[in-house]
Image (cartoon, grey):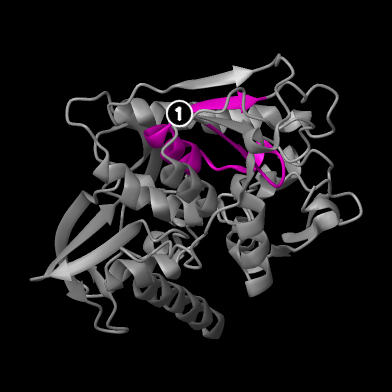
Amino acid sequence: MRFEKGFSIKIAENRCLNQTHHAVECNHCIENCPSKAILLHEHSVYLNKDLCCGCGLCFNDCPTQVFSSSLWDETSIVEEVEEQKWKATEFFCGKHSSPFNKDKTWKMGAVQLPACLSMISKGAWYEFGLKTAIELHLDQCEGCSMSCTLSRLDFNVGTAAEWLEASGCTPEISYIHQSSKGKTKKNLKAIETGLKVTSRRDLFLSVIGKGRQISENIRNNTKSFSKERDQERRNSYLPDWQKRLAEVYPNNRIKGASPAYWPTIQINDKCVNCGMCTNFCPSKTLKNTVEGGICTRYFTSGLCLDCRICQLFCPREAISRDREKVEKPFEATTLFSAAAIKCRRCTSITFDNTRHLCYWCREETAIDDEIKEKYRKLLL
C-alpha cells in the first residue's frame, strides 16, 4: 500500500477542531482508524507510523482535512473517469490481486486506487455518480485488516447517492462481494490512478503505464471561484472535496427533485451580535454584513462542517442546530437582520441599544462597576 507506515502523510495540526474548542470532542480520526495509529492527546494529533496500515481513510474522514499527502490527488480519478467517458466503472483497492476489467469494451472501465476504497470522499463519489455507473469490488475485503473501514465507505457512498437523487440522477452504485476470476490480459488491467504527477519522471512513468499521453496540467481545485470566494475558502478549514462540491452541486441541481438533508442552524432573540460564531466558524459559512445601518447574518448549509463550534462559543446560548432538507444548500440564506451601530467604546458593530455599547464592553463595564462597588464597601 502506497501510504503504509504513514509514508508521505502530513498532519496540519492547526486545522484540528479540537484545538479550536476543547468541547468539540471531534474523534473521527481516532475512532475510525483501522490500525489505531492515530492518537489525540491534550488536543494534539499524533500518528504512530509503525502502526499505520496506509488505508487513506483519514484523508477524507477528517472534516477539516488535517491529514493529507503530497502524493494523493483525488481529482485525478475524477478526471480519469471523465476523460474515458465510461458508461460504468469498476473500482479496485490497492491490495486487490486481480484488478481487471470483465470485458474489453469502451463502455466499461476500471481504476485501481493507491489504497483502500474508503479513502474516497463523499463528494468524489457524487462526482463519479454524475458521470458513470459505479461498481465497487469488495470481494477481497473479508479478512483484510482494513475491512472495518467499510462502514465509512458505505456512509460516504450513501450520502453521495442522496445528493445524486437531489440532483435528479438515479444512483447506479453496486457492491461486488463475489467476483468471478476475470481475464488477466494486460489490456484489461485497471488504470492506476489517484496519485499526483509531481515530476518529469512521474509523468514519464504514468505515460508508459497507461500507454497514452497524459496532460501535465494538474487541475486547480479553485480556478472557477471568484477572487473573493476563493480567498475566503482558502482561509477556511473546508476540505478540498467540499470546495469542489460547492461548484459541482449547484450546476447539477434539478428543479423539482427531492432535496437532500444538510446542516441548518437557528439563531434566537438572545443573540447580542458578539461575533463569536462568525469569528470562530472554521468553514466561514457564517457571515455578517452591515449595509445602511442594518446588520445581516447569513448561513450556507453546504459549507457547514456540522462541528458545533458556533453553538459552543455562543455566550448567550442563542444558537440551535438541526439537519433539514435544503433545496439550495450552497446559496447563502438570511438568518436575521437588525439595526446596528458602532460601539462607542471599541467601535465594533453591535445591535442598536440605549447604552451604545457592544456585548463585551457592557460585560466589562458591569464587572468594573461590581469591583468598584465592592471596593467602596471596604472603605466604608
Left or right side of 336 for 25: right
Image point (24%, 34%), residue name:
327
Quarter of the image holding residue 161?
A: top left
Q: Residues within 10 Å of mark 1 (few under 14, many from 20)?
A: few
How many labels were placed on the picture?
1
Residue 67 appearing in the image: no
Going by the numbered disc 1, the residue's amino acid type is Lys
Quarter of the image holding residue 361?
A: bottom left
Q: Nearer the viewer, residue 48 or 225?
A: 225
Residue 252's place in the image compared with 50, above or below, is above
Residue 351's place in the image compared with 84, above or below, is below
Image point (34%, 57%), residue name:
286
Residue that mark 1 sits on: 107
* Percent x, y of residue 149: 71, 33
Residue 207 appearing in the image: yes
Q: Residue furthest left?
A: 292
Secondary element type, mark 1 = loop
- Which residues are the magenta region? 109-137
Image point (27%, 39%), residue name:
252
Left or right side of 83 for 176: right
Quarter of the image holding residue 378?
A: bottom right
* Percent x, y of residue 194: 61, 51
* Percent x, y of residue 42: 77, 60
* Percent x, y of residue 275: 36, 65
Magenta-colored stretch includes residue 79: no
Q: Residue furthest right?
A: 50
Left or right side of 41 for 229: left
Q: Nearer the viewer, residue 209 or 39?
A: 209
Q: Nearer the viewer, residue 341 or 257?
A: 257
Magenta-colored stretch includes residue 134: yes
